[in-house]
Amino acid sequence: MLKFDTTKAKFEPLKPTELKSEDVLERYDLQQAIVTSWDLFKNEIGLPAAYLIGQEVTPDNSTQNSIDLLAYDPDDSSLIVIELKRDRHKLQLLQALSYAAMVAKWDTDVLISQIQRQYNPDPEELIDLINSNEINNDIKIILIAETYDPEVIITANWLESDYSVNITAFAIALYSMEDEMFLSLEQRYPLKELSDAYEMRGTGRKTKKQKDEVEWSDVLPKLQYPFAERGIELCQKIKAGDASRRRFGLIRRNYDGFTWISLNFRQKYINVYLKGKFEGDQDFLKKKFREPVTMNTWRDGLSLLVTTESQFEDLVKWLKLE
């Protein structure tokens, strides 16, 4: 990896190093950094809507071991088991699979009891999302390690291909320059180029039904911004949406350079997800709004937080929701 010094128009080398040689510990350093920076990390692994349930979560009373990180994906009501290794470990995948098998038996009450509220800015919204849908027992498994033995990737591919087990493996690489440390995250399985060929991973897998039929009228009182009702009404003219998950998925397809655009009606704002990237995309979006919007990047695109009436009106105009 090279550092690009644009002021001097030259590259500077970054020294590759290892977590162990830099005394970076698996739990107390790497894991804690992910927890502290969850909003950044979840974007890097391509799950921008995911909520962190907690760390060192005990999956079952029968084991003394714990899940490094457990998260919840409101897009399909599934749990995400994240296992970290500082270097490599052939049993990492087996460990993650055993944890996935254990949490797949959880019911809603157990899951809610495991929420570590100190890591959730809006725990009540998370609880409401969990209560609105049956837990999907198709668990997502995410492996994070510096490197992988071939056996791990071969096994992951077999489980994914033959048994539809949702596994993603990321390799982390550490670099140093003077007193600074840099970390890169690269998807090793499945190949990013292949997964991009599909609109959603897991197409064809079974999905859980909603617990009870949740209506948008049930969601509306929980939204704390004055333009929520109008936003929902405008979106419903285009599609019914998913009230239980508070979203209108793919409200626009192949629109202004983005593959798709979805709107999630969260408690304090509308979260706009955009899949796709192109040169100047952030500048393009900034020009669509009269006042600054909070903008984040995730692995496959961008996201916007619409918090004011002015931003909402500009969003309506841009997406032609009227």
Image: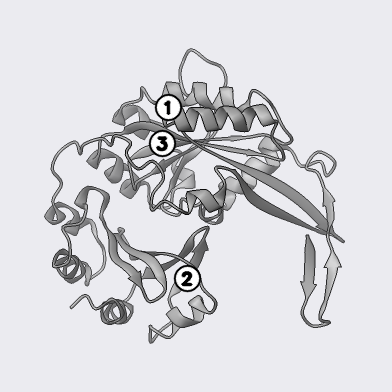
Evaluate if marks 1 and 3 touch, with contact meaning CB atoms under 8 Å apart: no
Is 167 placed above or below 92 here?
A: below
Residue at 82 percent across and 56 percent down: it is 176
Mark 2: which secondary structure? strand
- The disc label shown at residue 79, or none: 3
Position in image of residue 96 (x %, y %): 54, 27
Q: Residues within 10 Å of mark 2 (few under 14, many from 20)?
A: some
- Give the mark nearer the N terminus: 2 vs 1: 1
Measured in 3D between alpha carbons, the distance from the residue under mark 1 to the one under mark 3, in whole angstroms, is: 18 Å
Image marks 2 and 1: residues in contact by CB distance under 8 Å: no
Query: SS for tag 1?
Result: helix
Which amino acid does the dot numbered 3 rest on?
Leu
Residue 310 screen position, x and y as percent: 31, 82
Label 2 and label 3: CA atoms lie apart by: 26 Å
Quarter of the picture containing the C terminus is bottom left
Residue type at mark 1 is Tyr
Circle 1 is placed at which residue position? 163
- Indicate which disc, 1 or 3, sits on the residue closer to the N terminus: 3
Callout 2 amino acid: Met
Report helix, strand or loop for mark 3: strand
Judge whether residue 321 can be spotted in this image: yes
Residue drawn at x 22%, y 67% as measured from the top left:
228
Question: Which of the two residues, 61 or 95, is positioned nearer the viewer here?
Answer: 95
Task: Tell me, for residue 295, which label it has, or none.
Answer: 2
Instruction: Select label 2 or label 1 by which is in front.
Output: 1
Q: Earlier in the sequence, mark 2 or mark 3?
A: 3
